[in-house]
Image: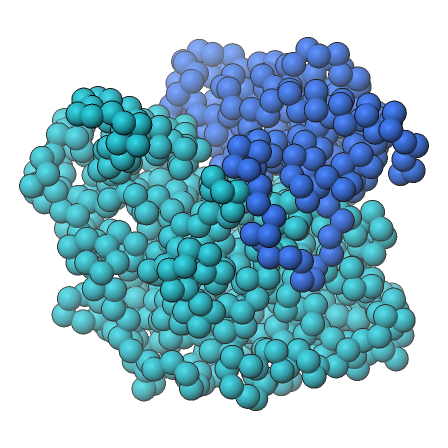
Chain colours: A blue, B cyan
């Protein structure tokens, strides 16, 4: 199939970017990123600079790939990262617009690559259980009810790709933050620090310049791991109750 | 340079405990003055950096990823082994040790493997304490399943995302140390060379991938946790950016590369569908708990399936060959990976392959769906349920167990595996070979340590499923933090190193010239095209089966391709910029040199063992034929220079506790 791609090209963080059009011949079995590989090989053959986009595992788990495809982070399919999107979902003659994530907390580095290090800093603020390597109690000494463990897992499945931020008109990172807060707060091991964690992570999120949550829930719709917005409700509850309960110093 | 395995004395089961109790320590006040560089943030690197930071060392940690959480450990699906014996099925430290030695076809060190089995139990406890959401049963306790090559259930798992959850645990521990200031994190920095001062590893040269700037970093010692080199084959289940550069640059500086030809070809991957393909996707080994592997008995049926005239469902039971169950009744579909992969190749070589390329076999869940469905119906009190009802209930059970894997399969192939049997084929997955290390995980270069897949230490010639996560975390959490003290206890008076010293400047200059050389070729072929061609040579001649003639041919082909690369490669863009093509170029350049060494190693080893199958050495039934008389050694290769023959050093393997036997899964 013949496709027209309109791709955002931007030389560097401070340069001005613009859309460029390209024609590419794709095959329905290809993945979306393999289609971009083909385009890049053609550009290299013409001694032009290939399109920079980030990717690594290409099986939907590392969270490196991104892209906003025709206005949707990770493209049209539900619960699918860009690297798992296949060209069989497109047809001959389609025009595909490919942009980087747009959020002031995720500045564009080059072409389609953005800087998502703000997520790391939010994690460093409190996205962990404070346990050092050593000799903790036996794993089976802490029974956890199956459904509870499963709910914690659903939140822990977040791959940190940032699609939630790109999907949100406010560029809010609430889904990301709430997924980690929920994962740990749902487990007995994470209870001790739950209040402190919610406070610290939210504070860092605000410092990074992410927007406020106004319950639009586009984040859940675009999340490649289908993380639920009920996590945001849980985060709000944790945050509010810890704010009321005590003046926690973080 | 020392080449002593430094295995401590004493009975096998007491070596580690005794050694740990008597080894040199570094006092807390001295730890604060010592700097350690850790390269890589996968399971091994992140767990080591976090643990060393917790101990009070000053750690600098480097990754080429944009975040430590992206390292390829994240993609491990199936699980992690531990000798907990929660299932009460006869497991023990000794049995895990024995299974690993046997699974590795008697080409690994007894002492290292026993230590691994011992600390496996601590890993589970540590991960649970960190909040890793392992699968649990209705009593709230940890659940287990079974993996290939063993007859117990010792594999802990977190759905099909065990690697992700364990890595996030290690990443969280690392994040905590970063926030406390004990670890300084450098994202998007790739190690391009190792700096030696007076024969000891004292620093690295890295490239800032956003600016292209080269940087010099100094420390008292260097830990490499940079993963495996499966991408030398171009197509593999490794992530696109996995590479050998850090380990290979260490080899060029004198570290020995051990058993480079031991490559694991994983039997259950989604088959290749076209020439444009960039990588292959693994389907977890856990699927072989319930999936049955088969091909049609008749070539005409296979042909009809390849041409789309029939599907697997059209082949009646009596015309199917469940070849693993037939050839290996004791282990059936759960034979180890090397055995399953070779058997798939044999079936396809006989013209029984079921994909258009001829390279695929079926992995069928129909029996499992019906079996689970019947059991579920029974537990619900349904008498004489219809087949449709049984199937419906069974599909739900299978979905609960493997749902995300089935979904992934459907996304990639467009076929529904609940209705049609999956098509699978072997693909390169893991490299057992790696930097040679002693019992302390130190290479022959003093002060250079290597952990995780990056070293050669524990898996011999074949790794068992769910053991990679175990080894990465064992090294990082529970071995290196102790053994590194053996080296550092002698360095407490050594002042900090100056990254402006001559050794650093010289090494940086080498690196710059190497990159300039590639940029300046300005030829006509892309880096990708060279990588593809190298991968094809490696797969055809040094893949699932090898022979002397092919290996010799491959060596010449690689040398020619390497020369062509330096004459005709085209690297677009600039050195002083964010330039992924340049990153690829220097990685591929190192793959040429490693690839040649792999071929040489495969040529040296005139036997078949584990993942190394030499066609000349097989039994009448086509099983691997080991030669314990002549090849019970670790081959450790010393690099001698461009276009010079590398020198082979042999570490004889001594088996005091295990009797060497023909590995049989029949």
Measured as percent of width and height from the top left, residue A29 is found at 37, 27
On screen, B14 above or below B277? below
**In this orientation, does residue B576 appear?**
no
Query: Which residue shows up at 61% across the image and 28% down it?
Result: A66
Given residues B195 and B589, the one toward you in this image is B195
Given residues B591 and B378, the one toward you in this image is B378
Q: Quarter of the image for the C terminus of chain B: give it.
A: bottom left
Horizontal side of A154 relative to B208 (left or right) equals left
Given residues B365 and B520, the one toward you in this image is B365
Q: Quarter of the image for the N terminus of chain B: give it.
A: bottom right
Query: Which residue shows up at 75% across the image and 63% down it?
Result: B52
Query: Which residue shows up at 42% across the image and 18% down it?
Result: A89
Query: Which residue shows up at 57% across the image and 66% down it?
Result: B119
Horizontal side of A18 relative to A199 (left or right) equals left
Horizontal side of A55 relative to B431 (left or right) equals right
**In this orientation, does residue B396 appear?**
yes
Measured as percent of width and height from the top left, residue B121 is found at 55, 62
């Amino acid at each position: 199939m013949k496709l027209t791609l309109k791709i955002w090209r931007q030389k560097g963080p401070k340069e001005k970017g613009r859309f460029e059009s390209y024609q590419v011949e794709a095959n329905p079995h290809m993945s979306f990123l393999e289609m971009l590989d083909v385009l890049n090989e053609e550009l290299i053959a013409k001694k032009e600079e290939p399109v920079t986009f980030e990717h690594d595992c290409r099986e939907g788990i590392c969270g490196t790939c991104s892209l906003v495809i025709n206005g949707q982070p990770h493209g049209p399919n539900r619960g699918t990262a860009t690297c798992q999107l296949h060209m069989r979902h497109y047809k001959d003659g389609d025009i595909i617009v490919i942009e980087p994530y747009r959020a002031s907390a995720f500045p564009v580095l080059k072409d389609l690559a953005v800087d998502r290090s703000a997520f790391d800093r939010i994690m460093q603020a409190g996205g962990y259980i404070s346990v050092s390597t050593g000799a903790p109690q036996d794993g089976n000494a802490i029974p956890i009810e199956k459904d509870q463990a499963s709910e914690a897992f659903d939140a822990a499945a977040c791959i940190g790709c940032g699609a939630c931020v790109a999907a949100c008109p406010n560029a809010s990172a609430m889904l990301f933050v709430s997924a980690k807060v929920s994962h740990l707060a749902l487990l007995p091991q994470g209870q001790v620090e739950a209040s402190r964690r919610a406070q610290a992570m939210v504070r860092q999120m605000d410092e990074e310049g992410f927007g406020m949550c106004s319950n639009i829930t586009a984040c859940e719709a675009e999340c490649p791991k289908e993380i639920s917005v009920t996590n945001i409700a849980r985060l709000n509850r944790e945050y509010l109750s810890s704010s009321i309960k005590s003046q926690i110093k973080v | 340079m020392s080449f002593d395995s430094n295995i401590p004395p004493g009975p096998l089961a007491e070596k580690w405990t005794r050694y740990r109790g008597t080894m040199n320590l570094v006092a807390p006040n001295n730890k604060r003055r010592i700097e350690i560089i850790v390269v890589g943030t996968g399971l091994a690197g992140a767990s080591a950096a976090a643990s060393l930071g917790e101990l009070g060392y000053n750690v600098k940690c480097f990754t080429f990823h944009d975040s430590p959480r992206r390292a390829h450990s994240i993609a491990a699906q199936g699980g992690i082994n531990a000798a907990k014996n929660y299932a009460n099925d006869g497991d023990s430290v000794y049995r895990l040790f024995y299974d690993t030695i046997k699974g590795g076809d008697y080409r690994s060190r007894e002492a290292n493997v026993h230590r691994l089995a011992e600390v496996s139990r601590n890993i589970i406890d540590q991960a649970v304490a960190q909040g890793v959401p392992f699968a649990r049963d209705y009593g709230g306790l940890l659940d287990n399943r079974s993996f290939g090559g063993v007859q117990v259930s010792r594999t802990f798992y977190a759905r099909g995302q065990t690697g992700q959850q364990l890595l996030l645990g290690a990443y969280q521990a690392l994040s905590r140390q970063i926030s406390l200031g004990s670890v300084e994190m450098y994202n998007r920095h790739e190690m391009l060379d190792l700096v030696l001062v007076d024969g000891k590893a004292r620093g690295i040269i890295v490239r800032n991938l956003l600016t292209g700037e080269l940087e010099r970093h100094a420390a008292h010692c260097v830990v490499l946790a940079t993963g495996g080199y499966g991408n030398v084959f171009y197509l593999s289940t490794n992530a696109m950016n996995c590479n050998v550069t850090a380990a290979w640059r260490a080899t060029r500086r004198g570290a020995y590369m051990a058993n480079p030809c031991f490559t694991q070809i994983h039997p259950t991957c989604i088959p290749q569908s076209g020439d444009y393909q960039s990588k292959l996707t693994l389907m977890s080994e856990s699927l072989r708990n319930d999936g049955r592997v088969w091909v049609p008995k008749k070539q005409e049926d296979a042909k009809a399936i390849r041409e789309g005239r029939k599907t697997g469902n059209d082949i009646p039971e009596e015309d199917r060959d469940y070849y693993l169950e037939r050839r290996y009744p004791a282990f059936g579909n759960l034979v180890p990976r090397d055995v399953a992969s070779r058997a798939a190749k044999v079936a396809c070589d006989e013209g029984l392959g079921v994909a258009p390329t001829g390279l695929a076999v079926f992995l069928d869940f129909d029996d499992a769906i019906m079996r689970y469905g019947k059991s579920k119906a029974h537990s619900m009190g349904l008498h004489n349920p219809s087949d449709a009802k049984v199937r419906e209930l069974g599909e739900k059970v299978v979905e609960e167990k493997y749902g995300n894997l089935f979904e992934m399969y459907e996304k990639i192939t467009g076929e529904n595996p609940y209705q049609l049997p999956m098509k699978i084929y072997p693909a390169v997955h893991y490299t057992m070979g790696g930097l040679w290390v002693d019992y302390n995980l130190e290479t022959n270069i003093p002060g250079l340590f290597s952990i995780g897949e990056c070293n050669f230490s524990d898996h011999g010639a074949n790794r068992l499923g769910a053991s990679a996560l175990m080894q990465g975390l064992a090294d990082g959490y529970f071995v290196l933090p102790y053994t590194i003290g053996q080296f550092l206890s002698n360095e407490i008076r050594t002042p900090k190193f100056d990254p402006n010293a001559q050794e650093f400047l010289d090494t940086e200059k080498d690196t710059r010239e190497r990159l300039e050389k590639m940029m300046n070729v300005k030829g006509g072929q892309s880096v990708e095209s060279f990588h593809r061609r190298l991968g094809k040579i490696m797969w055809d001649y040094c893949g699932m089966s090898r022979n002397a003639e092919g290996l010799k041919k491959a060596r010449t082909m690689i040398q020619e391709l390497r020369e062509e690369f330096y004459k005709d490669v085209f690297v677009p863009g600039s050195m002083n910029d964010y330039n992924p093509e340049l990153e690829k170029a220097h990685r591929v350049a190192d793959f040429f040199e490693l690839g040649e060494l792999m071929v040489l190693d495969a040529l040296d080893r005139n036997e078949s063992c584990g993942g190394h199958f030499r066609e000349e050495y097989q039994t009448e039934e086509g099983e691997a034929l080991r030669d314990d008389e002549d090849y019970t050694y670790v081959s450790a290769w010393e690099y001698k220079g461009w276009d010079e023959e590398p020198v082979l050093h042999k570490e004889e393997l001594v088996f005091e506790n295990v009797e060497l036997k023909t590995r049989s899964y029949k």
